[in-house]
Image: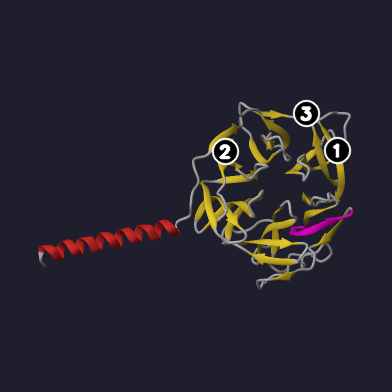
């Protein structure tokens, strides 16, 4: 090979290598900047987190062998500060199950107040809980629509779990819908009356946006409350006005939490995608996915303006809460 041929061959190889690198970069999931620590616990585990409208970060935390978590707030210094409930208010000895921002910017929760196990949706006002609705037992995970008369529940029947509508004080099965993609499992099948876990199929990990669209994960293979690590979960979005239900984005395994990112038509999911564990932002319109942070993350929540998310990472005997920016529309 002549000297000119060698140069042309080297140039060609360099061009091919550069093209491969560009292709690999384009295909690789995008990862945002490094997280910033918001707080750390002292020998406690954070089960759930939520930002209030004024950007205060609240948490449900557990220590030792206590079955149900307690309510706390992270201070500006990142310290987990327990909140002692008013003994004269509604449900002063509450057992907490979920935290979620309400449409008006206040903070809401699901609690039980007595041995009967009846669960209530409440609003948190300082050290007081204000009753919003009775959810029955053992239903949980209320996500309110803006009219505050309808919302979404995790319906529990024995070891079965599905999603249902909460309307005018009543829990109902998932409403009828027009799927735009073929689903192997009907979300309406697991109703309050006939959910018996005999057939695979489960929905959960839900959140609702300002327009009333419900985002959730569903699995055709999941059964009961304990799942194998390889069970896949598909993101779905349901428009309760048009009755359209459609899939978007890739499947996940081992999901822990899902939260809507305001003003973005996207959600963040903590779990495993394509063999990589982390927190992912998934865009409902395009189906594209961006990796926000790699690692073993649990609860997630989005800031009111959607610019950042808070995520919980376990570090052995302690948990830390990190903040990281979201990705613009893709």
Q: Is residue 100 above or below residue 239?
A: above
Q: Residues within 10 Å of mark 1 (few under 14, many from 20)?
A: some
Dominant SS of magenta comes to strand
For the magenta stretch, what is the residue range?
156-168
* Residue 197 in view, yes or no: yes
Q: Quadrant of residue 42?
A: top right
Q: Position of residue 290 (x, y in %)?
A: 53, 53
Q: Is residue 325 above or below residue 136?
A: above
Q: Residues within 10 Å of mark 3 (few under 14, many from 20)?
A: some
Q: Nearer the viewer, residue 70 or 294?
A: 294
Q: Residue at x 66, y 62 (%)?
A: 236
Q: Residue at x 77, y 46 (%)?
A: 103
Provide the residue designation for mark 1.
Answer: 130
Precedes in sequence: disc 2 or disc 1 = 1
**For the residues marked 1 and 3, what is the alpha-carbon distance in whole angstroms?**
15 Å
Looking at the image, residue 162 sits to the left or right of residue 324; the answer is right
Q: Nearer the viewer, residue 78 or 209?
A: 209
Q: Residues within 10 Å of mark 2 (few under 14, many from 20)?
A: some
Provide the residue designation for mark 3.
Answer: 84
Q: Position of residue 31 (x, y in %)?
A: 49, 49
Provide the residue designation for mark 2.
Answer: 322
Q: Secondary structure at mark 1?
A: strand
**Residue contact between numbered discs 2 and 1, judged by CB atoms under 8 Å:** no
């Amino acid at each position: 090979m002549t000297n000119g041929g060698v140069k042309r061959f080297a140039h060609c190889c360099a061009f091919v290598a550069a093209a491969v690198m560009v292709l690999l970069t384009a295909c690789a999931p995008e990862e945002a900047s490094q997280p910033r620590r918001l707080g750390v616990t002292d020998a406690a585990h954070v089960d759930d987190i939520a930002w209030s409208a004024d950007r205060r970060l609240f948490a449900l935390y557990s220590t030792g062998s206590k079955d149900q978590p307690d309510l706390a707030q992270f201070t500006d210094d990142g310290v987990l500060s327990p909140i002692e409930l008013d003994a004269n208010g509604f449900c002063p000895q509450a057992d907490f199950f979920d935290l979620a921002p309400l449409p008006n910017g206040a903070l809401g929760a699901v609690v039980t107040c007595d041995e009967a196990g009846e669960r209530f949706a409440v609003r948190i006002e300082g050290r007081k809980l204000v009753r919003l609705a009775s959810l029955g037992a053992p239903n949980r995970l209320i996500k309110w629509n803006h009219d505050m008369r309808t919302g979404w529940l995790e319906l529990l029947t024995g070891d079965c779990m599905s999603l249902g509508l909460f309307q005018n004080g009543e829990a109902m099965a998932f409403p009828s819908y027009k799927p735009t993609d073929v689903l192997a499992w009907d979300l309406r099948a697991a109703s309050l009356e006939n959910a018996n876990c005999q057939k695979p199929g489960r929905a959960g990990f839900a959140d609702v946006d300002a327009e009333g669209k419900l985002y959730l994960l569903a699995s055709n293979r999941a059964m009961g409350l304990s799942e194998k690590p390889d069970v896949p979960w598909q993101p779905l979005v349901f428009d309760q006005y048009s009755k359209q239900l459609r899939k978007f984005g890739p499947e996940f395994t081992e999901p822990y939490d899902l939260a809507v990112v305001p003003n973005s038509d996207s959600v963040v999911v903590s779990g495993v995608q394509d063999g990589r564990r982390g927190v992912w932002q998934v865009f409902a319109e395009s189906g594209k996915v961006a990796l926000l942070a790699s690692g073993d993350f649990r609860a997630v929540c989005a800031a009111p303006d959607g610019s950042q998310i808070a995520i919980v990472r376990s570090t052995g005997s302690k948990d830390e809460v990190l903040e990281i920016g979201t990705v613009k529309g893709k």
